[in-house]
Amino acid sequence: MRVLLAMLGARRRYLVPEVMEELGVLGCFVTDVFMGKVGWLRSAIALVARWVRPKSVRALLGRSSSRIARERIVAFQWLGIRYAIATHVGRGDARLFAAVNRRFCLKSLPHLRAIDVCWAYNGAARELFEAARAKGIRCVLEQVIAPRDDELRELRQAREDWPQWDCAEEQARPATSDPLAAREQAEWRLAHMIVVGSRYVRDCLQRSGVPAGRCTIVPSGIDLERFQVGTEVRGGRPLRVLFVGQINLRKGVPYLLEAARRLNTARIELRLIGALQSRRECLAPFAPWAWFSGPIPLAEMASYYQWADIVVVPSICEGSAMVTYEARGCGVPIIATANAGAFFSPGVDGLEIPVRDAEAIASVLDRLARNRNELHGLREGAIANRHALGRDAYRDRIRSVLEAVRGPQFHA
C-alpha cells in the first residue's frame, strides 16, 4: 500500500506522517513549509521573523521531523510562507483560507501517481479527492474539528455571553455563505472514509447528514517519553489549575476566568499558557485570579503539566484537543467539556462539564480544592490509562484504518 498524505501545516507535530513512515506505507508526504527540506530556508525565515516578528512566521521554524525520509517529502515552501504572512495580516478570513487550500490541492495533484490511498484534511482535500476518485484511489478525510457550521454556531452563542472578546470577523458569517463550509461539505461526499478524533465530531457530522458508517473515531497519540509522570505533592498548598491553548473564545477561556473570579479564593492557583488571540484588555479584569505566561516551547511543556494538579479544557468547539492527551500522559487528570473531544473516561481520569458554563467549572474546582482524595483517585486513573495515549497504540489505530478503507464496504 502507498499513501499520499497531503497536510498543510504541522498538525500534531507531524505525528501522522511519522506513523505512516513507521508502517512503511508513506508514498509521498505533501506539505507547505518544512524546515528539514531546504537548508537555507531556516536562516531566511529567522531573519524575517527577527524584523517582522509575527508569531505565525516564527512558528514556521519548528516545522521539521527527522522521522520522515526526505525523499518522500514534497514541500511548497513559498506557498506556506505567503500563507503565514497573509494570515497575520488578515486573521480569520475564511476566503483566504479557502483560496490557499484550493491552491495547495492543485499543486499536489501531480503526486497522485502510483498511490492507493489519498489522505487529506478538512477544507484542504476537495480537488485532490476529485482527481483521486477519477483514478480509483481511495480517499480518507481527516476531520480535525467539528464541521464549520457547528463551529460558527457555537461561537455565535459564546459571543452573546462575551461580546467584548475578539473572534475572527469571518466567524460571524452564516455557514451557508462560508467558503470553508462549502469545501467541507463537498469533501464529505467524496471521501470513502472520514476519520474523526472524538464522538463529538462524529455526532456533528451525522447531524449534517454524513452516514454513520462512513465515520470512524481514531483518538490521537503522543510520545509518552516526552510527557512523563511527575511527583505528586498533596496538601499544604493551593490547588494548581492549568490551561494550555490559544487564549481565545473558541477555547472557552472567558468561562474559566469567570469561574476563578467567582471563587475568589487563595485555595486555587490558575495559570494559563498560550498565545493571546483577543484584546489584552479582556484579561485585565481577571488579573487578580490568573497568571498568563504566553506561549511556551514544546520542550518545556512537560514541566508545566507536572506542576499542575488538574488541567481544565473548557473548549466550545474542538476535534480532540491535544492538551487532553499531553496532560494525562503526565498523570494529570482533566476537566473538559464534551466539545473538547477528549479521549478519557469521566470519573476515572477526568471530569466532564457542560459547555459555556462558568458556574460548573467553579463548582468542580472548589470541590477538588476541598477534597484532595477525589483528585488523587483521578490522578491514579490517569496514570493507569496513559498507555492508551501512546504512539504505539495510535500507530495500531492508523494501521486498522488503512486496512479497512481498502475493504469492499468502501468501494463506492
Image: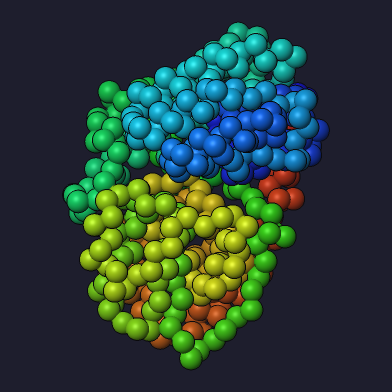
Q: Is residue 136 above or below residue 258?
A: above
Viewer-closest of 30 and 128:
30
Please give the name of the residue rendered at 31% of the width and 82% of the height, measured from the top-left corner. Answer: 265
Tell me: 201 left or right of 378.
left
Residue 116 seen by the camera = yes
Image-quadrant location for residue 39: top right
Image-quadrant location for residue 404: top right
Q: In this view, does 276 lie above or below 347?
A: above
Image-quadrant location for residue 168: top left
Please give the name of the residue rendered at 46% of the width and 27% of the height, measured from the top-left corner. Answer: 83
Please give the name of the residue rendered at 69% of the width and 54% of the height, measured from the top-left corner. Answer: 223
Tell me: 156 left or right of 92.
left
Residue 355 lies, in percent from the top left, at 33, 56
Residue with the most extreme top position:
134
The number of callouts visible is 0
Tell me: 158 left or right of 392.
left
Residue 205 lies, in percent from the top left, at 43, 35
